[in-house]
Image (spheres, rainbow, N blue to C red):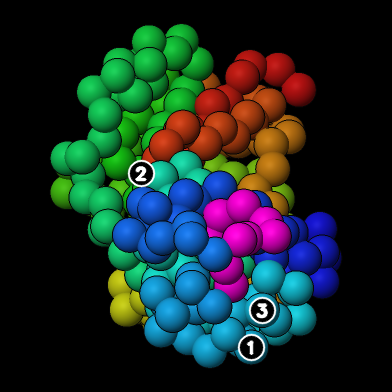
Amino acid sequence: MDDISKRKALGEFIKSQRSQIPPLSFGIGTNTRRRTPGLRREEIAQLCEISVTWYTWIEQGRTVSVSPQALARIADALRLPQAKRSYLFKLSGKKDPQLPDIVDDQIPAEVIAVLRNIKTPAYLLDRYWNVVSWNRPAQTLFAGWLDQKSQQKNLLFYTFCDPAAITFISDWELRGRRLVAEFRADCGMYLDEPKILAIVERLCNESSAFKYAWSLQDVTEKEGGERRFHHPTLGPLCYQQVNLRVANRGELKLVVLLPGG
């Protein structure tokens, strides 16, 4: 979906939600005849503290300058439940300013249980690409990294700053560049977040390969496919990688490596 289509879809979604709001739920009387159901544009605009003209343009998909704060006020005025609110921000390509920061100990126990019961290497990435949980096969595969308690468990720092990764990952240079492009796509709406900025700055300082790959401005979705490794004791290994998102926790990514290729 291109930018114009996204703006149109966003406007149509907002309009549809406005039409479903009973005026009485806001204490607005219905003595006057309404040509369409729901609240009028000027009523929502007033609730959002934005101009009617600008709000109209948003519904018509005519503006690209909608700030996350304005979208949050619209979502609040429309009283959107979480699923619809997330969808609104996904269409806009903006970060919800009210999105809570996720910390490791908030990972649902059932997600950890699923991960631990997978029989092939699997690990869970957070928004910053920290490996926040992994199973025993993954610990065996990534020996020297996931089995070391004191070592940083960040996929980017491992790939670009651990010398062992260069010989362990087949086609390291190509895979590294693709990894950076996937990270840029994954955190696109969070690039101004201090923690993301700090990660990128540190990686640029510690790895010339990352700095160069980041400067390319490449963007690609995180896809599966063949992954080859040269394990120090098990020898050459080949997997098919599958990437999954955790329902209602879109910042968590489950990566599963299936044998064969």
Exactly how many numbered labels are in the figure?
3
What residue is rendered at 44% in x and 80% in y? 46
Disc 3 target residue = 56
What residue is rendered at 81% in x and 58% in y? 1
Q: Classify 10 Å Cα crowding around label 2: few (below 14), some (14-19), many (20 and above).
A: many
Q: Earlier in the sequence, mark 3 or mark 2?
A: 3
Q: Main secondary structure of the magenta part?
A: loop
Q: Distance between the Cα atoms at labels 2 and 1?
A: 46 Å
Q: In the drawing, does residue 252 fall left or right of residue 244?
A: left
Disc 1 target residue = 53
Q: Can I make out residue 113 in this image?
A: yes
Q: Earlier in the sequence, mark 2 or mark 1?
A: 1
The residue closer to the viewer here, 64 or 197, is 64
Quadrant occupied by the C terminus: top right
Locate residue 31, reporting x and y percent.
Answer: 48, 60
What residue is rendered at 69% in x and 36% in y? 224
Q: Which residues are magenta?
A: 33-41
Is-magenta flag for residue 70? no
Instruction: Assign a secondary structure to mark 3.
Output: helix
Locate residue 42, reporting x and y percent.
Answer: 54, 78
Q: Which of the 4 image quarters holds residue 174? A: bottom right
Q: In the drawing, does residue 36 fall left or right of residue 25?
A: right
Q: Can I make out residue 140 in this image?
A: no
Does residue 44 sit above or below 150 in this rendering? below
Q: Distance between the Cα atoms at labels 1 and 3?
A: 5 Å
Disc 2 target residue = 131
Q: In the drawing, does residue 49 fall left or right of residue 153?
A: right
Mark 3 and mark 1 in contact (Cβ < 8 Å)? yes
